[in-house]
Image: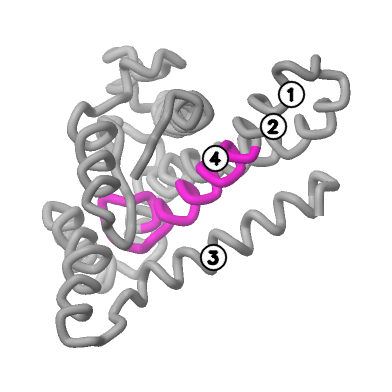
Amino acid sequence: MNINFYDLSVWVLPLLLAITFHEAAHAFVAHRLGDNTAWQLGRVSFNPLRHIDPFGTVILPAMLLFAHSPFLFGYAKPVPVNYRNLNNPRLDMVWVALAGPATNILLALAAGLAVHALPWIPPGSAQWIADNLKNAILINAVLAVFNMMPIPPLDGGRVAVGLLPRPLALPLARLEPFGMMILIALLILLPLAGSQFGLNLDVISAILRSLTGYVIQAVLFLTGNA
């Protein structure tokens, strides 16, 4: 797989912005709703270095990329939230969790609108900016959809824990320590095991790709690019 400097330059910037705004949104909403944990740790920040996890953001995606994994994913440094400090812990947990994916959707819409400014960009840099904007729409759509999977510690899992009746919410919340292992099993190990027997078990990835496609189509439609 040949990856040149140009390819890196049009992927890294939108990826860093998407991750940084996603995590900063979690921290900001938590602060507004009563928990200052992330605020005091400097996580309400647009500095990417405050949110990047060396393994989850860099090493893991790179390993999966070069291993030709059927699905690429990674994670940023989790934003610490003490839900007991929130004004209304169960409901506010939902708003804190939704803040990240909602911010990614807003960033995708902003990138879609920015496409209309390309005719005024100098020809020498127009293609580079266009590729950044295209990748920004894709990356933010992927992050929004992926993070809304109903598995803690993903945002969708925390939304589900906050909204489900307590008898259902408590067992789901207890899955959080095993969430990443469950994701790796569903997205990587299961498809790889299926391929050894000639079976296509890449079901979750296929669903995520379809949902991401619908989100991208909606973004393009709403921003006048469809």
Amino acid at the residue labelled 4: Asn
Amino acid marked by disc 2: Ala
Q: Earlier in the sequence, mark 3 or mark 1?
A: 1
At label 1, counting other C-alpha atoms closer than 10 Å, the crowd grade (few under 14, some 14-19, many 20 or more) is some
Disc 3 or 2, which lies upstream in sequence? 2
Q: Which residues are magenta?
A: 134-156
Residue type marked 1: Ala
| Residue carrying label 3 | 211
- Of residue 210 and residue 10, the one placed in the foreground of this image is 10
Name the residue tied to disc 1.
126
In this view, 206 is above or below 20: below
Q: Which residue is mark 4?
A: 104
Q: CA distance from mark 3 to mark 2?
A: 23 Å
- Residue 110 coordinates in the image, percent (x, y): 70, 33
Mark 2 and mark 1 in contact? Answer it, CB < 8 Å.
yes
Reading the image, the residue beneath label 2 is 130
Report x, y in % for residue 146: 41, 55
Q: Secondary structure at mark 2?
A: helix
